Image (cartoon, rainbow, N blue to C red):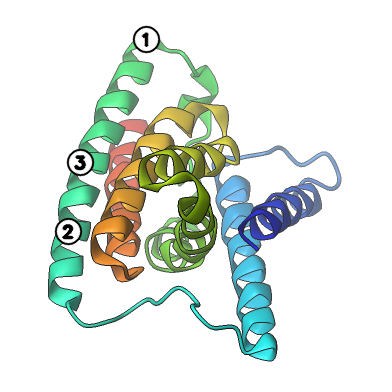
Amino acid sequence: MGLIAALMFFVVQAIALLMQTIGSRPITGQTIWIAFVSSGAVTYAVMRLVYWRAHTAGVPRVLDRGIAAALLWGAIGGAVAALAGIAYLEFILWADWFPALRRAGPLAGPAIPWWLAGVAIVAAPIFEEFIFRGLIFGGLRRSLGPVVAALASAATFAVVHPPASVIPVFVMGVCAALVYERTRMLAGPMAVHAIYNATVLGFQWIALH
């Protein structure tokens, strides 16, 4: 199910991006974020429906006993991922590896930033952690072990992101997988993801505006 979810995420993301660029409209940070959240929401809803209709046991849990400890581990993992993300952004902006990043940051535009930031910080972690940690990491872990599964699920997560963000997203994915392995509930990696997104988006908003 994890590989099916990953394929669905990628296909829906491509369709959402294509629909937003009809009429030769340019690809911007906003269109990429909207495509990501849309694909996450659709994949999450379909997977939840399949599990519900099939009465599947062992569905990844968001909350469980020990939630306070899970959120603490999530905060620690999120801080590590956020620091790595900021260091990476500082470097690529200094080296000017991706000039387009300066022209079209993910929060460029006068009307969308606040609601888009809210969606990225709240909705995206819920949808994407269920898919990439709950389904993909959880499935790979059963046959490959936690370390290889963490690296493989993080790599899968990274390759569906734009080239400029592959490295820090990979680091964030590893942190989220390790937190999930430690806590056995998705609240932990969701916290990692939310903290990472909030920090990186805030940094880009300041640096690019």
The image quadrant of residue 43 is: bottom right
Residue 151 lies, in percent from the top left, at 43, 37
Q: Amino acid at mark 3?
A: Val
Q: Is residue 46 visible?
A: yes
Q: Which residue was labeled with disc 2?
A: 73
The image quadrant of residue 169 is: top left
Q: Amino acid at mark 2?
A: Trp
CA separation, marks 1 and 3?
23 Å
Residue 145 lies, in percent from the top left, at 41, 46
Q: Secondary structure at mark 3?
A: helix
Position of 90 with respect to 36 (left or right) is left
Query: What is the quadrant of the N terminus in the image?
Result: bottom right
- Residue 95 is marked as 1
Quick check: marks 2 and 1 in contact, CB under 8 Å? no
Q: Which residue was labeled with disc 3?
A: 80
Q: Residue at x 59, y 62 (%)?
A: 40
2, 203: nearer the viewer: 2
Residue 80 lies, in percent from the top left, at 20, 41
Crowding at dot 1, Cα within 10 Å, few <14 / some 14-19 / many 20+, comes out as: few
Q: Secondary structure at mark 2?
A: helix
Q: Residue at x 44, y 68 (%)?
A: 126
Kindly report which numbered mark, 2 or 1, lies closer to the viewer in this rendering: 2
CA separation, marks 2 and 3?
11 Å
- Residue 109 is marked as none
Query: What is the quadrant of the C terminus in the image?
Result: top left
Q: Residue at x 53, y 34 (%)?
A: 104
The residue furthest right is 23
